[in-house]
Image (cartoon, rainbow, N blue to C red):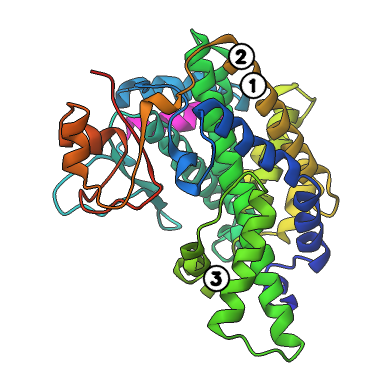
Amino acid sequence: MEASLEAEFVSKSIYDNLVQSVNNNLGQLHRYYEIRKKALGYDTFYGYDTYVPLIKDYNVTMTYEEAQILLSNALAPLGDTYIKDLEKGFNNRWIDVYEDDSKYTGAYSWGTYDSHPYVLMNYDNTLDSALTLAHEMGHALNSYYSDKAQPYQSADYPIFTAEVASTMNELFVTDYLIERASSDQEKLYLINKQVENIRGTVFVQVMFAEFEQRTHALLESGQPLSAEVLNNLWLEVIQKYFGPGYNVLDEQKYDWARIPHFYYNFYVYKYATSMSAAFSLFNQIKAEKEGSVEAYLEFLSAGGSDYPVDILKKAGVDMNSSEPVDGILAYFGTLLTQMEELLDKTSTGMTSSNTHTVIAGDVLWKIASQYNVSLEELMSINKLQDKDLITIGQKLIIPAN
């Protein structure tokens, strides 16, 4: 473990503090699942229920041109220089925007030291695509500033700081949208998206990090690591993190084996530290703390010129303390309170009458026929890729006629 962390000059105490801070706040994650369970009207709650929308038939669509305007407005607190360079990227074909035949899937930022960054997108007019654009342009401008300010040998930045720039943009854009939501439904939708972002980036990644930490500890103590040992440890960890209101299926004991990051020693924790650091910088800039924008731009320009923890400290974030992690976990709790208030105000939470629980013998086309909806519509609203892949106990959303 120490050898892996030392590659980026990160102390073991930072890793330990991260895991401990999240463990101290697991009650907030348990609370989130209970909120969802209540809002959906379920007696039992499973992992796939996390993806059932709280607001029926609600989506945000956004053209690429509208996303550009959104980013320019939402990221304005980062200063005129940042926005000028952001729009330079928009207007000078840094971005391969739309889906195409045989095009690589997903999104990423890439470039060379003596070229501007290039961003691959598969933009599909959704809010998720707009947030992905914000994320990748965060990486792109981080590279752009580092390459301009640093010699070749120190221009590249480590993973420990890389996700700060991208996550910062997502935080600003989502916060901008939440503050300007035109209805309670829209605000609930956006808050839940922010909650899910933190759940996946902080809680889940730290759960992965703890599992990895404990497997290495077992090995170092001389205990052989069989599949049974790893399966049982994984079940123990996810039950602890997800809480008593979350029903863990026995099949989930194999999930650890499908996570590729476990084969890159002690990697996943960096997602959580990056989001925590980004949230700390976000708060300083939003509060218009003197010098915070300049310090952030210097951070983006630092590349790998110093140890990553020291680069962040110069920007105003001390990752040797638990304060950055505690801060974003407190924010998570605040968002949950807002969710509960909005759910109380609206009657948009899905109830059990809007769902069908899969039983033995069910097939999707028969369920569609039973409720007089098309198979395609049923698959679309439940985000199913395979019409033959449903499981007993799974709850399907039934669209209204």
Q: CA distance from mark 1 to mark 2?
A: 6 Å
Residue 170, relative to residue 247: is it above or below? above
Residue 212 spot, x, y in % from top left: 64, 70
The amino acid pointed to by label 2 is Asp
Quadrant of res 82: top right
Q: Secondary structure at mark 1?
A: helix
Does the residue at mark 3 contact the one at mark 1 (Cβ under 8 Å)? no
- Categorize mark 3 by other alpha carbons within 10 Å: few (<14), some (14-19), many (20+): some
Viewer-nearest of labels 2 and 3?
2
Quadrant of res 291: top right
- Categorize mark 2 by other alpha carbons within 10 Å: few (<14), some (14-19), many (20+): few
Q: Secondary structure at mark 2?
A: helix
The amino acid pointed to by label 1 is Glu
Viewer-nearest of labels 3 and 1?
1
Q: Quadrant of the C terminus?
A: top left
Q: Quadrant of the N terminus?
A: bottom right
Q: Give the labeled residue for mark 3.
A: 262
Residue 331 spot, x, y in % from top left: 72, 32
Q: Earlier in the sequence, mark 3 or mark 1?
A: 3
For this rendering, which residue is in front, 238 or 335? 238
Magenta residue span:
81-92
Give left or right: position of 323 versus 47: right
